[in-house]
Image: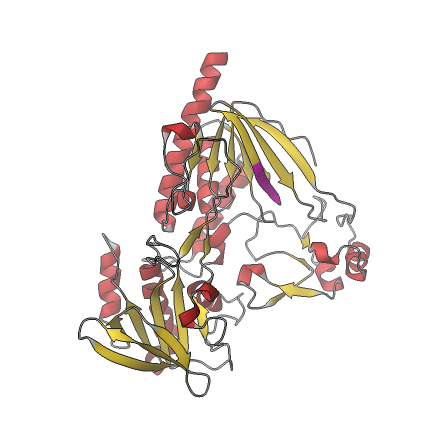
Amino acid sequence: MSEVIATNQTILVAGGGISGLTAALEAAECGKQVILVEKGPTVGGRVGQLYKYFPKLCFPTCGLEIQLRRLKANKNVRLLTMAEVTGISGEAGNYTASIKLSPRYINENCTACGECGKAVEGEYDDEHNYGMKKRKAAYIPYNLAYPQRYVLDPRAVGTDDGERAKAACKYNAVDLDMQEETLELNVGAVVWATGWKPYPAAKIQPYGYDRYDNVITNVEFERMLDPFGPTGGKIVRPSDGVAPKNIAFIQCAGSRDRNHLKHCSRICCMASLKQTTYVAEQLGDACKSTVYYIDIRAIDRIDDFYQKVQKDPNVSFVKSKVANIVSGSNGNVVLNGVDTEGYNRYANDHDLVVLATGMESTVPQGVFPEGTVINEHGFIDLEESNGAIFGAGCSSDALDVNRAAQNATAAALRAIQVVTKVAAQEG
């Protein structure tokens, strides 16, 4: 790859999701030099996996496309994909960041013509769709991916598939000899925006995610609705591909729980309310939705959205922490618990269950200089001892998209102040 130039007046942004993109672009549009590092082959993060935003129910491709247009137009941002920050040392205004670059096996000659994808035969679980479908060994992660360049799965290198991909490419873009590289960069400030991951549903043993086909997570349900997703946009039961008639949405699946995530993940209530509108839109009166909740945390303007969902006669609410899920008949499952409003025990039969899994931090341990404060929930606190390392978006707290973007802008402004001060001292 070409040389990466960075100085103590450069801002490093780790993570290319909506928060990282926002922080990088805000800083770059203020005239600062930015290196944006993304572990995966494309920017976009979790937003790229959503079907719609709440509460307006608009498609995230709109907002994401705007950010990508800004990124492509700004020469102050250097984007590194397949790159991971493995260590940071130093102090505010003078950090050394170690960055591991994993081989993509496809170089910048790629025109995204797709011939390599046609040539290979191997298939692997599709990460963008949470393993709900397969992808080819040579692939573009999703339709809006940027860079719009193919990736060759490392498991195909050294196999016939690797040679097929190379032979099919007319532009000498397939490079099977690519090796892992390490960069050492001098930067003045760091914005950490590596986002979140869904809490592993299999850890919530009473809910049977790993035992019952028709117990899925909210992020998997979201992918179902995407026309490019695993079911072509159709809401179906994984067990038989049939449209469900009675869906249960279980709130706080792993959140607000001493055995799992102690914190409230903030997005789950609204995500489930949003998903009931998907059911209403696609299945109408043919399907009922039941939301099992501890309490619905819908504040400010999104309370109007909650009230609108409450008026839907096909949506009902049960105030209860579901105790467990057991097998029913015909692939159905039975939810057991106590309705805490009437203190009545229930054993309710559903043909599909959607778990609103919590938001787990991806902030790593052992990467930051001593003194960087990471709280008990795994998020970066805003503390003076952190120097010029600033958490952004869901690296600082559990946040929805709107608040994550606002938080990232604030982090960018703090980083700008640091490198501006460095420039003034050296000028």
Residue visible at 48% across and 17% down? Answer: 423
Disc tally is: 0
Residue 285 at least partly seen: yes
Q: Residue 10 location in percent, x, y?
A: 53, 27
Residue 61 at least partly seen: no
Above or below, comparing residue 172 to residue 51 in the picture: above
Residue visible at 47% across and 61% down? Answer: 200
Left or right: residue 168 versus residue 330 is right
Magenta stretch secondary structure, dominant: strand
Towards the viewer: 73 or 13: 13
Q: Which residue, as the protein is rendered here, is positioned at the far left?
A: 342
Above or below, comparing residue 394 to residue 222 in the picture: above
Q: Residue 348 location in percent, x, y?
A: 32, 81
Residue visible at 24% across and 66% down? Answer: 308
Towards the viewer: 204 or 251: 204
Span of residues in magenta: 80-86
Q: Residue 210 location in percent, x, y?
A: 50, 71
Above or below, comparing residue 114 to residue 25 in the picture: below
Towards the viewer: 58 or 214: 214
Q: Residue 399 location in percent, x, y?
A: 36, 49
**Residue 83 magenta-highlighted:** yes
Left or right: residue 30 versus residue 126 is left
Quadrant position of residue 1: top right
Towards the viewer: 88 or 222: 88
Quadrant position of residue 164: bottom right
Q: Which residue, as the protein is rendered here, is positioned at the far bottom?
A: 329
Left or right: residue 249 versus residue 364 is left
> Which colour assignment does the render follow?
secondary structure
**Residue 203 magenta-highlighted:** no
